[in-house]
């Protein structure tokens, strides 16, 4: 089988770019993270405590590389595209 050539967006994590920390539940449900030994606490923090989650889009063509296009934080020092708001 030929290897797929995919583009990817930059990664984003729950708790950043206006994605509420409770977005961890989306990641946990998609990955069955409990089977990896990671627990999601009622506060949406993870145990072990140095665990990190993030997501990225992978497709043949990714039209928006940076989630900043959808984020309302205009004063973010990590912003990857100019703010037009």
Image (cartoon, grey):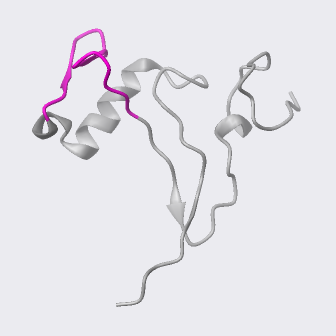
Q: Is residue 46 left or right of residue 34?
A: right
Residue sitting at the far front = 50
The part of the chain drawn in magenta is 37-53
Helix, strand or loop: magenta stretch:
loop
On the image, which quarter does residue 84 sit in?
top right
Q: Quadrant of the N terminus?
A: bottom left
Q: Quadrant of residue 77?
A: top right
Q: Note whether 32 is above or below 7 in the view shown.
A: above
Q: Residue at x 52, y 25 (%)?
A: 19
For the point 69% across and 60% down, which residue is it? 63
User: Is residue 16 placed above or below 43 in the rendered structure?
Assistant: below
Name the one closer to the observer, 49 or 31: 49
Give the farthest residue toward the top: 43
In the image, residue 51 lies at what x, y percent?
A: 31, 25
Image coordinates of residue 32 in percent, x first then y, are 18, 42
Q: Is residue 63 magenta?
A: no
Please name the residue shown 68% across and 29% down the image.
71
Instruction: Locate residue 70 relative to residue 7 in the image: left or right.
Output: right
């Amino acid at each position: 089988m030929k290897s797929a050539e995919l583009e990817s967006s930059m990664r984003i994590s729950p708790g950043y770019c206006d994605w509420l920390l409770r977005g961890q539940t989306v990641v946990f449900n998609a990955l069955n993270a409990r089977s990896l030994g990671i627990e999601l606490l009622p506060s949406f923090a993870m145990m072990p405590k140095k665990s990190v989650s993030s997501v990225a889009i992978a497709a043949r063509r990714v039209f928006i590389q940076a989630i900043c296009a959808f984020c309302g934080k205009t004063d973010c020092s990590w912003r990857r595209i100019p703010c037009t708001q």
